[in-house]
Image: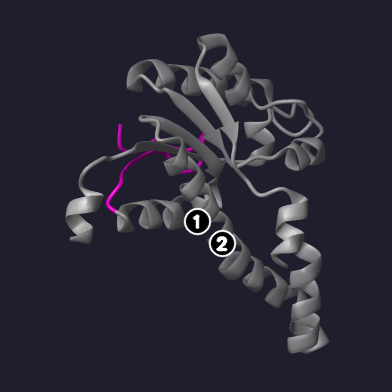
């Protein structure tokens, strides 16, 4: 029964991994060529795939942290009249869920020896925070109900997000695992 329900409607997700500094077009940390190439890449993906929604692992908090007002993809979306959403949890949402950096650092200090706490904080962040956030992103994309959706996130989320999306029988194509590295599935 569940499989027949899941087969009714597919949301196609086109996945692009990159660094958040490049995603934001941070000119102090990225060279102009990479920024320009990323902009062209996002724009051509939107044209080629007839993208109707661009979703990003981003929040207003993260934009401020990166020192920018918008992302490259948000600018492309505005120029092409494509819907755009930031779908990451805000700092307040992460804190409420106790998956923010400070909360996980406290857990690591409480559970592990001082010599291991920094390493374990990173492990906890990847295995707890990342997985919760990735599920929230997918839920937010699916709740939009728009296909195809271009989703841009940090390169370290590509494999997990791909597997998660496939596990619920949705269509996903990886266009870049870590832009500007080699492109895939095109």
Which residue does the numbered mark 2 point to in the structure image?
132
Residue shown at 52% from the left, 12% from the top: 81
Q: In which quarter of the image is residue 111?
A: bottom right
Q: Which of 75 and 118 is in front in this view?
A: 75
Element type where label 2 sits in the image? helix
Q: Would residue 67 be found to the left or right of residue 158 on screen?
A: right
Q: Quadrant of residue 127?
A: bottom right
Residue 80 visible to an observer of this rendering: yes
Mark 2 and mark 1: span between their CA atoms? 5 Å
- Residue 49 placed where, x, y %? 34, 22
**Region rendered in magenta:** 169-186
Total of numbered circles in the picture? 2
The magenta stretch spans residue 113: no
- Residue 177 placed where, x, y %? 45, 43
The magenta stretch spans residue 180: yes
- Residue 28 placed where, x, y %? 79, 30
Q: Would residue 22 be found to the left or right of residue 98 on screen?
A: left
Element type where label 1 sits in the image? helix
Residue shown at 77% from the left, 37% from the top: 66
**For the C terminus, which image quadrant?**
top left
Residue 112's disc is none
Q: In which quarter of the image is residue 183?
A: top left
Scheme by which the image is coloured: one colour
Residue 135's disc is 1
- Residue 70 placed where, x, y %? 71, 26
Residue shown at 62% from the left, 63% from the top: 129
Look at the numbered discs 2 and 1 and tell me whether their residues touch, using CB distance below 8 Å: yes
Q: Nearer the viewer, residue 63 or 156?
A: 63
Q: Is residue 73 above or below residue 23?
A: above
Q: Would residue 52 be found to the left or right of residue 136 on screen?
A: left
Residue shown at 39% from the left, 57% from the top: 164
């Amino acid at each position: 029964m569940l499989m027949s329900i899941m087969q009714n409607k597919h949301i196609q997700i086109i996945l692009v991994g990159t660094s958040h500094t490049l995603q934001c077009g941070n000119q102090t940390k990225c060279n102009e060529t990479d920024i320009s190439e990323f902009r062209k890449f996002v724009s051509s993906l939107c044209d080629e795939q007839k993208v109707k929604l661009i979703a990003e692992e981003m929040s207003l908090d993260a934009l401020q942290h990166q020192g920018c007002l918008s992302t490259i993809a948000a600018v492309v979306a505005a120029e092409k009249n494509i819907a755009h959403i930031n779908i990451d949890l805000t700092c307040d949402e992460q804190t409420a869920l106790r998956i923010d950096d400070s909360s996980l650092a406290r857990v690591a200090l409480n559970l592990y020896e001082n010599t291991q706490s920094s390493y374990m904080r990173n492990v906890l962040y990847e295995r707890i925070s990342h997985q919760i956030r990735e599920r929230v992103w997918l839920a937010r994309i699916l709740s939009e109900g728009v296909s195809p959706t271009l989703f841009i996130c940090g390169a370290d989320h590509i494999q997990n997000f791909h597997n998660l999306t496939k596990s619920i029988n949705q269509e996903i194509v990886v266009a870049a695992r870590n832009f500007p590295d080699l492109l895939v599935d095109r």
